[in-house]
Image (tube, rainbow, N blue to C red):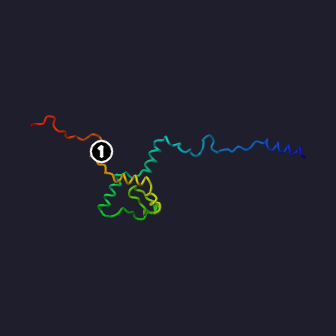
Amino acid sequence: LLLTNKVFRLFQFSQPKEIPTNNTMGTGPSAKKFGSRSKIKKYKRKTWLCRRVKDTDQIQDEIEKAKETGKPITFKYDDELPGGGQFYCVETGKHFTDAKALADHKKSRYYKKRCKDVKDEKYTQDYAEWAAGMTKEKLPPAHAKK
């Protein structure tokens, strides 16, 4: 009886185990690894555009229009927007799901920095030309007539 148990154990360990096979031969893993698209220019452009936030000058325009009309910036109920479009942060241009999420957002560093940027003076075409050095400076004449 002891001999048969030893033989049985040896036989049990000597059998090859089944190797899991993949039905897709030679195509590699079915899912892309994280960061594998990091060098693809089309992918970068597409993802950047879909997550882009409003620029500060666009937000400043909205605030000016709201002050001129005297009405605050509000949205009608819309199922497509988070929270039905009822919880909107004007300074960052984002919608939130509920009042708590909006209150937490207003405590964040991003919100405070964005408020500071919106309060700054609005960029104009004159300022852009001045920064590029395209303006003509009015200098006093070199030899003034007396």
Locate residue 133, reporting x and y percent: 27, 40
Nearer to the camera, 32 or 137: 137
Mark 1 highlights which residue?
Answer: 128
Residues packed near mark 1 inside 10 Å, few (<14), some (14 to 19) or many (20 plus): few
Residue 81 seen in the figure: no
Nearer to the camera, 130 or 51: 130
- Determine whether, in the image, residue 20 is placed left or right of residue 10: left
Residue at 44%, 51% (x, y): give it: 51
- Determine whether, in the image, residue 137 is placed left or right of residue 47: left
Locate residue 77, reporting x and y percent: 42, 65
Locate residue 91, reporting x and y percent: 38, 56
Nearer to the camera, 11 or 60: 60
Q: Is residue 128 above or below residue 99?
A: above
Residue at 62%, 44% (x, y): give it: 24
Nearer to the camera, 35 or 138: 138
Residue at 41%, 59% (x, y): give it: 89
Residue 17 seen in the figure: yes
The image quarter containing residue 14 is top right
Residue at 76%, 42% (x, y): give it: 16
Locate residue 110, reporting x and y percent: 43, 52
Is label 1 in a helix, a strand or a loop? helix
Q: Split into 4 quadrants, where in the image is the C terminus?
A: top left
